[in-house]
Image (spheres, grey):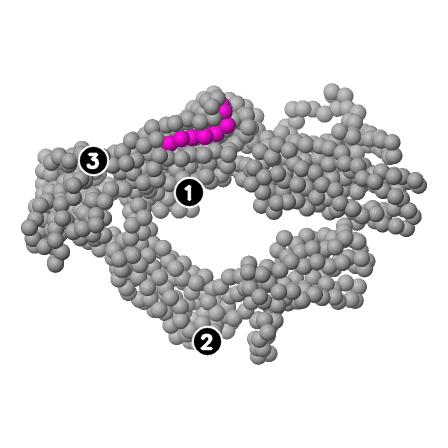
Amino acid sequence: MLLSLLPPLLLLQWSLTSGEIDPYLLKATSQAVPVVTEDSVTSLNKPAKILINPQENHIFIQTDKPIYKPGQTLKFHIVSLDFNLLPHNQVFQTVELQDPYSNRIGQWLNQTTRIGILDLSHSMSPEATQGYYTITAKDEKNQQISQRFEIKEYVLPKFEVKIDFPTVLTVKDEEVILKVCGIYTYDKPVLGSVNTEVCVQSNYYKPVFPNKLDVCKKYSMMADKTGCGSQVINVSTFGLSSGGSFQVNCNMTESGTGITMQGSTSAVIIYDYVRVHFEDTPDTYRPGMDFEGKIVVTNSQSRPMENEPVIVYALYGGKKVNVTLTTDISGTVDFSFSTSDWSEETVKLWANHKGGKKRPDSEAYTYYASGYHDVRPFHSEDNSFLLLTYAPENPSCHNEITVMVRYTIDASALKLGQTTLQFSYMVLSRSVMAQIGLLSVNVNSRNGAVITGDLKFTLNDQHLLVPFAHVVVYTILPSGEAVAGNILIPNQACLSQVSLEFSSSTVEPKEMVYFILKANPGSLCSVRAIDQSVMLLRPEAELDAATPMVLSGLEFGYGSEEEKPTQEIRKSFPETWIWDLIPVGKSGSVKVAKMVPDTVTKWAIRAFCTSQAGFKVAPKTDLTAFKPFFVSLTLPYAVIYEEMFTFKATVFNYLPKCIMVKVTLVNSLQFTTQPCKSCTYTQCVCSEESQTFQWIVTPSELGKVNITVRAEAVQSQGLCGNKVVSLPDKGRVDTVTQSVLVQMPSKI
């Protein structure tokens, strides 16, 4: 009897005194309680033992970025939500910051959240030890949460390497194309060279070349105007064997600077076979109700196969029935079987793909792919069942969700002359009752007959049913048996009821922009923007505000003035641009103005909000800061005092025509310079191209030393090759100042 489904319903009356259940339970416990239910047809009065779980809060810590340099400021939020994902204001007795050796280097006492969010920061020492640090927060109930971050001496990458290579190869393959591309963070192609090593690790049990298990080959290529280099690889020369794998390691070197970034990928080696597997297929069946499921057919490249024949078998009680079907454009096929003679025993399902092709016997088992799935009967003493479905299949937050209930009731389980049967339903989300109701159907009880039918109802307040709704429907038969069915309905779309839109998707550095943040009235929103380069440095650690969903069981125009000889210097290059807590008033919308930093890059924007409507997440947003003519400095993290190093600056031209560029390293008392041999500091730079300039620099001061470079498009009567030199109307000058850390030799 499914008493565990019943207590939340209105039909049930809990005979509890105030002292029977402690509302402040600190750990899970079980208690016996009397349960009483009664209507005009059935009655039930018996004790039930229930498991009572304490209501736990959900706490998570979000740092503004996953990695820091010594001397940078750590910024972090501690977010506290109750079991219903509503903001939970509480006091954190202690918040501690520990270094890699577990020494406490920071502490906050008795800190209170604001609408569920606590905002803290800590300036790290310039001499901070490199390694992983830990933030630990403990609340008044001694509930504890920790978050790690890394401190490291690093230089942000300016581009990433993307590899296009099959993830699966077959022993029948002869050639594949390897494509390697370099992309700057502002979405422009990288010009340079690519060196690749491709290795095959053979199957130890069946090597094609017994005396050489690993075969490696190296390839070199130049990136074209799109930033990509391609290579046809004759994989048949590697001696492929099933069970082996390909490992591809690529180094892309930027022209001029010599900066190298790495990328890698891998591929498994298999026989030429088709994969068949069951998907969205239940593990149980209701005797007397049709059993429905889905099969997906993919090829060796994991791509769906259309118009492929699939034979689905059901094996039970010494019988074997089958149906032949054809896959659709998505490689899927829906099937159903009558369960009328399945005799309440475990049924084995077997899906077989033949493909209409003949294969040698030695390969038949690898090609004639099969999928297997066992289903067991759902037991009912009165042979009565409920089956729940819902529509639409992928609901949005604004669509109505309709729950359909198919019922099969054995008429002999009803009272003689009974004409109606009541069904009760409840909708739960995050362990909280959100909706209940009653549905009545007409029945004509006849001994030996089976009563079947369908009923449906609509879910209310869908925005509260996140990240999923648990729907339970039941009826109590005169025998006392509760016939029940349940279904989980995903509803994560309603978590994204926050929008953040910028006035433009692409802007210039130093430009004022605004964004409009929309959320539930009274929300407190965390908005964060960090340089995409940080994501490249730690791609596995991208901070996504959607991550906490698992807690519940569950991411302007340009000026037109004439350019003046001087221009404001670009010198603000923060890794975190925005880290704000923004309140949203009664209107549900707020407009925020910001000045874009000086970095030419893409800014990754993420936001989440807390309010009495719950925890909401904004879709990911990006803002690109870009200018068509700029200079970029290439500096190491640190250099040695009074020791020469080669300093490079690269000028990029994304204007439509060639320009003549004069580049100047501004003199400073902090260092001495000398030009490199055969270097020319006035050169042509044509459209979609770059030129790198270099100097020999000797630092004469310790600490941070500023280096300033000025690039100017100048008038020229000469030609760039056979192309006329153009002088842009605006954006002719770009001046950049960046710093490099100068240390004594023992520090490097």
Question: Can you tell which quarter of the image residue 12 is in?
Answer: top right
Q: Nearer the viewer, mark 1 or mark 3?
A: 3
Q: Would residue 689 be found to the left or right of residue 109 on screen?
A: left
Which residue lies at the image location 9% right of the left edge and 41% below the top edge?
A: 672
Q: Earlier in the sequence, mark 3 or mark 2?
A: 2
Q: Quadrant of the C terminus?
A: top left
C-beta proximity under 8 Å, tags 1 and 3:
no
SS label for mark 1: loop
Q: Nearer the viewer, mark 1 or mark 2?
A: 1
Residue that badge 1 annotates? 542
- Tell me the amino acid under the disc marked 2: Val
Magenta region includes residue 518:
yes
Dot label at residue 208: 2
- Tell me the amino acid under the disc marked 3: Ser
Q: Nearer the viewer, mark 3 or mark 2?
A: 3
Depth check, front residue: 347 or 685: 685
